[in-house]
Image (cartoon, rainbow, N blue to C red):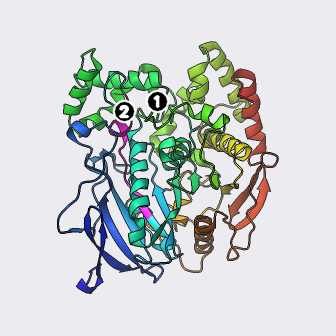
Amino acid sequence: MKIKMSEFVTVDIPQGRLRGKRVTSDATGVSYYSFQGIPYAKPPVGPLRFKPPEDPEPWTGTRDALAEGPICVQGDMFSGELVGDEDCLFLNVYTPQLATRSPKPVMVWIHGGKFSMGSGNTNLFGPDFLVAEEVVLVTINYRLGALGFLYLEGCDVTGNNGLRDQVMALKWVRDNIAQFGGDPGNVTIFGESAGGASVHYLTLSPLASGLFHRAIAQSGSVFIGGCNVPVGAANQRARRLARALGCRSEDPRQVAACLRSVPAEQLVADKAKARDNQELHGAILDQFFPSHETGPEAFLPDSPRRLLESGLFSKVPFITGVTSAEGKVKLFDSSYRLKFPEIDQNFTSVLPMELSDNLDVETCNEIANVVKKFYFGEKHLCEDTVAEFIEMQSDVEFVFAAHETLQLHARWSQLPVFAYLFDHEPAPGSGFLHTVVEDVPGVPHAGELPFLFRGSEYRDFPPGAPDAATRGSMVKLWTQFAKTGNPSSDAVQVTWIPATKEKLSYLKINGGFKMETDMFKRRTQFWEKLYEKYLPRKN
């Protein structure tokens, strides 16, 4: 798109003047203002690597905010190619208006990608549909992999820096969004997968308290398998990676100095060297994840489970939910099917890490047999039981995590807690980023994203088609929640009933919109009884 000089606009913030542009969406016909590549923190390079983010530096003159900033160093989620830059702490603002006496609600999007890939860029997260509903959309980058989540005890390497980046971005929103027509007193954080887990983490962190007022965790929770690492394991992974990169000192301060001298790309390229043999063959998603800390500036002062079971989290209106076939994510890589015989002989590899980390080998083998019988009966894992495998993986990684999250928030929060199940499959070839196991029904992990965002990686839905109607309704529900804390909308003709500790109501999205109760009840009850027997929860 060519931008005429008359379409440029400027905004002043404490760091200096920004030049953005006015854009008219060819999807909605609605005009909005776009400011991209805004630095919200000082570049986390050199001595600032592995440290909390610092305030951004000012600039002189007018800084162009006409293009997205560099993404963080990562293996590209599509090609696997090493891409990105260590100087990557940028955000984008899309707004229907500039500074005004009638500020708009703000929605801050946190991307997913296993805490190791992704960005806030428009190839997946274009603002067209959300901004058309009169909200301000902010999308962010945050440090990933070892650069964002490596933790080493005994030195100045802090953990959870990727999450601390998100806090810094929220502080930037608090301090600056009014200049872009947004309301700093009405901020909704929302994200999917690792972004949904990030949203959930932010509700637990005292560092983020007061920086947001509503939250939506899509297919993400602090309970997702492997996305929370005990401090000891995090420290061991850092040590293993350091040794593999030639940093062999026993003094953690020297190890930290050595790791700061390694090219950022090498830290990412060699990340698998942080795993031990058990992790290489287990269900671990990646190597570097959030972990709880100690000290007055800890992002996460205790384990997520203890914080949630004690009611120690931000009580804000909250939405959580899943897609109907989350487990298809395992099969995005077609070569994964080659592992079926190995998994069939070693079902402990698919157990939730909370079980395998806390129970002995004999007990884990016993549990694995129980799990296998529940999902497969007397059958084996093979091409004929792919549907059963998808159901099991959905529960192990996402469904039961969302179930526990919903229960705990409904138990402790006095503000409404909403749940959903997204089960709208787009017409073949018309809308979704991935084509995965088409002969098995259900929406895969991330399948709701094209129903909220526009992106070059998605194919547009034909106007007037059921997919476009569902997208319009989804956008209405999400933006209505951002505006009021209640997603119910006259435009959608559904009353979204909150869940309570007595009744776990949820909205089923499947062409239409219908309230139901006890999502996947048989399966969640199975896991509740299993944990009650082998690893009892706190009452």
Q: Amino acid at mark 1?
A: Glu
266 horizontally vs 339: left or right: left
What distance separates the C-alpha of mark 1 from that of mark 2?
9 Å
Q: Is residue 445 above or below residue 252?
A: below
In the rendered image, residue 280, in percent from the top left (x then y), is placed at 44, 26
Q: Nearer the viewer, residue 14 or 500?
A: 14
Q: Which quadrant, please, contains the N terminus?
A: bottom left
- Asked whether residue 217 is in view, the answer is yes
Tags 1 and 2 touching, CB below 8 Å: yes
Q: Is residue 122 above or below residue 490?
A: above
Classify residue 74 by image quadrant. top left
The kind of secondary structure element at disc 1 is loop
For the point 46% across and 30% down, the residue is 293
In the rendered image, residue 394, in percent from the top left (x then y), is placed at 62, 43
Q: Nearer the viewer, residue 444 or 333?
A: 444
Q: Nearer the viewer, residue 262 or 135?
A: 135
- Asked whether residue 458 is in view, the answer is no
Task: Work out whether mark 1 precedes mark 2 in sequence or the reverse, and give the earlier one.
Answer: 2
List the single residue furthest toward the right: 502
35 horizontally vs 214: left or right: left
Residue bounds of the magenta highlight: 138-151
Q: Amino acid at mark 2?
A: Thr
Classify residue 411 by image quadrant. top right
In the rendered image, residue 374, in percent from the top left (x then y), is placed at 73, 32
Residue underneath mark 1? 293
Q: Residues within 10 Å of mark 1 (few under 14, many from 20)?
A: many
The kind of secondary structure element at disc 2 is loop
Residue underneath mark 2? 158
Q: Which quadrant, please, contains the C terminus?
A: top right
For the point 58% across and 55% down, the residue is 216
For the point 58% across and 74% down, the residue is 468
